Image (tube, grey):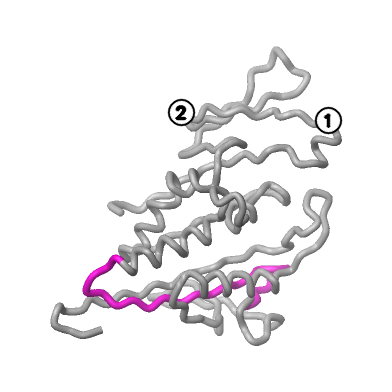
């Protein structure tokens, strides 16, 4: 990864059952080659559509696999090379954040960004030569301006934000869990997901009422050819 950069991509989900029952119409179109979105105002044929340009655009028929390969893969690859990386999903309730990040098991092309990143990281570890790795996971939730450890012994305990001259901003006493393979990462993610705050909304009956951050901490140590691992 030659330089630091922030890229913004947008993904459009199809109409859900509620919107279809109400007779809602799609007002957004995309030019995938130019990474542009066009929003047309209903009942205003003479008014030109609003136009927005992004670093990547994904319409309703494009899969999470395609999005990961084009937009997330280079970032995770940079992490395996020692750079920091963050994938930040933003959108209103019911916009598809959990679907994109967590995904579903079937069809395989719609598996989420997070489990794909697990596989990516451990495949890179298996291919690395003369290198030792320590992989740890953490999972926190920000709910009603309070920070909770979703993998801690007491998930109701409120954590404090601190700042360190080298580490930067961090959550004090956030638990870190060593993981050795993809299955252990997925177990951690499922365990934390069950501890999240959820509530019914008009857009999503299982809406998470919080922000959450799943972090993979990767430490690497070079070893000489003559050192046994």
Looking at the image, which is closer to me, 12 or 2?
A: 12
**Quadrant occupied by the C terminus:** bottom left
- The region drawn magenta spans 127-149
**Quadrant occupied by the N terminus:** bottom left
What predominant SS class does the magenta segment belong to? strand
Q: Vertical placement of 72 versus 190: above or below? A: above
Mark 1 residue crowding within 10 angstroms, few (<14) / some (14–19) / many (20+)? few
Residue 174 lies, in percent from the top left, at 55, 81
- Name the image quarter holding residue 201: bottom right
Q: Is residue 130 magenta?
A: yes
Q: Which mark is residue 33?
A: 2
Report which residue position mark 1 lands on. Answer: 23
Looking at the image, which is closer to me, 184 or 139?
A: 184
Seen as rendered, the residue at the extreme right is 22
For the residues marked 2 and 1, what is the alpha-carbon distance in whole angstroms?
30 Å
Residue 213 lies, in percent from the top left, at 57, 66
Question: Could you tell whether 2 is left or right of 51 in the image?
Answer: left
């Amino acid at each position: 990864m030659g330089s630091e950069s922030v890229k913004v991509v947008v993904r459009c989900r199809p109409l859900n059952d509620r919107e279809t029952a109400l007779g809602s119409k799609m007002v957004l179109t995309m030019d995938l080659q130019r990474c542009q979105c066009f929003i047309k105002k209903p009942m205003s044929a003479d008014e030109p559509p609003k136009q927005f340009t992004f670093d990547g655009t994904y319409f309703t028929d494009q899969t999470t696999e395609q999005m990961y390969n084009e937009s997330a893969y280079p970032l995770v690859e940079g992490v395996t090379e020692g750079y920091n990386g963050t994938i930040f999903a933003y959108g209103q309730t019911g916009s598809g954040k959990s679907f994109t990040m967590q995904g579903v098991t079937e069809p395989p092309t719609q598996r989420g960004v997070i489990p794909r990143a697990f596989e990516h990281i451990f495949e890179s570890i298996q291919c690395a030569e003369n290198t030792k790795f320590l992989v740890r996971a953490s999972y926190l939730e920000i709910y009603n301006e309070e920070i909770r450890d979703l993998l801690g012994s007491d998930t109701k305990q409120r954590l404090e934000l601190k700042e360190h001259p080298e580490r930067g901003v961090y959550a004090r006493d956030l638990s870190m869990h060593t993981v050795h393979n993809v299955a252990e990462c997925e177990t951690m993610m499922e365990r934390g997901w069950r501890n999240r705050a959820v509530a019914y909304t008009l857009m999503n009956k299982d809406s998470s009422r919080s922000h959450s951050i799943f972090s993979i901490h990767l430490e690497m140590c070079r070893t000489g050819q003559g050192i046994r691992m």
